[in-house]
Amino acid sequence: MDNPVLNYKNSDLTASVNDLAKRIIPCLDVKDGRTVKGVNFVALRDAGDPVELAYQYSNQGADELVFLDITATHERRKTMVELVRSVARQVNIPFTIGGGINEIADADILLNSGADKISINSAAVRNPGFIDELALAFGKQFVVVAIDTKHINGKNYVHLNGGRIATEIETEDWIKEAEARGAGEILLTSMDHDGTKAGFDNTLLKKVNDTMTIPLIASGGAGTIQHFVDCFKISNADAALAASVFHYGEILIPDLKKVLKENNIEVRL
């Protein structure tokens, strides 16, 4: 197969990953073409049009965007290519797309449609070699391995299909394997914290980040600007991702970055 990297709109993606600035990433969970948000992965409610939100976040100063078709794997559907094309026309910042990506051809069409990176979750757990295949075909910088984790009986376990299916795989072990296989970044979502607005799981984030050599995106639990400050100071995560606090205007990205800067956390203003 021809090297797809040559066809993509932005082959220099490492700059946003490898510099010192911390990244702020709004996440848009998409279901039936609409942005939705819930608590602990359930009780979903509408949060708006994903393309319109993407445009707003790009103008506000978000560093990147993540779109997750949250029912694509569960309902055996492919991620919406048209959404990717629409977003690519509206924003000038990198964005990642995930959901229902099970083979090289899925990733190829999404990247060629305008996505900067692809995110895999359940498919990677079921077929770990898929990470190797993607990294070989496109380069590590295009591959984000997303992990939904839940704390059970003193340990952290990986969950699949939007958190619906528990596995016996310990989260820390899976992160190490994903990195070894060629993941370019890890997007770690704490299901216990997701949507609660009680703060990130900084204990877990610091524990895993101390053992990683690739960027870590913290996800799950953002409720206040201070939560972002704490996340970066305690865990030293490379990026922090949130959804509802951005979607419903509870935190504005310019205000967030101003406070982070005041706390000596390097961000792009």
Image (spheres, helix red, strand yellow):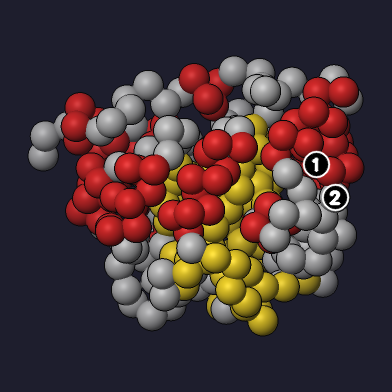
Q: Residues within 10 Å of mark 1 (few under 14, many from 20)?
A: many
Q: Nearer the viewer, residue 76 or 26?
A: 26
Q: Residue at x 72, y 54 (%)?
A: 249
Q: Quadrant of residue 240?
A: top right
**Which quarter of the rendered picture does the C terminus lie within?**
top right
Residue 168 seen: no
Residue at label 1? 228
Element assignment for label 2? loop
In this rendering, the answer to whether 98 lies above or below 57 is: below
Look at label 1 and name its amino acid. Answer: Phe
Q: In the displayed structure, does residue 47 sit left or right of residue 12?
A: right
Element assignment for label 1? helix
Residue 118, image x, y percentages: 39, 47
Marks 1 and 2: in contact by CB < 8 Å?
A: yes
Q: In the displayed structure, does residue 191 sit left or right of residue 101?
A: right
Residue 227, image x, y percentages: 85, 46
Residue at label 2? 224
Q: Residue at x 84, y 43 (%)?
A: 225
Total numbered circles: 2
Q: Identify the disc placed on residue 200.
A: none
Residue 161 seen: yes
Q: Nearer the viewer, residue 248 or 111?
A: 248
**Which quarter of the rendered picture does the N terminus lie within?**
top left
Look at label 2 and name its amino acid. Answer: Thr
Residue 110, image x, y percentages: 28, 50
Q: Quadrant of residue 63?
A: top right
Q: Residue at x 60, y 29 (%)?
A: 213
Residue at the limit of the structure toward the left, as seen here: 1
Q: Residues within 10 Å of mark 2 (few under 14, many from 20)?
A: some
